[in-house]
Amino acid sequence: MSDIDLDKILSTPQEVPHSVEVVLRKLEIAEMGRAKRDMAGRLHVILNSVNKALCRMRLASAVEEEDDDLITQSQHLEEKRRRGQQLVTIQAFLQSSLDKENELSVVLQWLRNMSEWHSAISCSKCFRIGPKCFSN
């Protein structure tokens, strides 16, 4: 047997440095933001495609039923207006969620900085020796 037991080393959890954790968190936040923006763009494209297909279907239906042409077109316009409003509402919701996520990440980073600052202050007080420690 050797002095180094590889199985024992691999089985014990390794501690990740704080700076690496911070970088990983920032990468995760950035990746989530990009994914949300990408999904919002894809959703916009999908909703536009569905709306266009629905328009074509309704127009084809209106051509087949000449007697109901005016009714179908007015329903079509109302449906198109309603879908447009829903699309705007969905886009506003997605944008607000992205804004909230950004604001919360800024607040979280500030809290982490303040925590580090407070822990640094408390550690510096612990290392003081002599009458200076009690002067405050």
Image: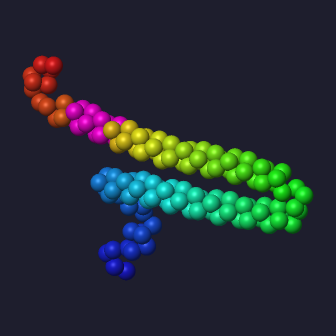
Return the x and y of residue 72 as percentages of the image width and height. Answer: 82, 54
Give the colour scheme shown. rainbow
Instruction: Say whether residue 117 is magenta.
Output: yes
Residue at point 38%, 73% (across, down): 5
The answer to whether 49 appears left or right of 115 in the picture is right
Is residue 119 visible to the viewer in this orientation of the structure? no
- Quadrant in which the N terminus appears: bottom left
Residue at the far bottom: name it: 1
The answer to whether 68 appears left or right of 10 in the picture is right
Q: Nearer the viewer, residue 41 or 3?
A: 41
Instruction: Say whether residue 115 is magenta.
Output: yes
- Quadrant in which the C terminus appears: top left
Residue at point 39%, 74% (across, down): 6
Return the x and y of residue 63 as percentages of the image width and height. Answer: 83, 65
Give the overall secondary structure of the magenta segment.
Answer: helix
Residue at point 42%, 53% (across, down): 29
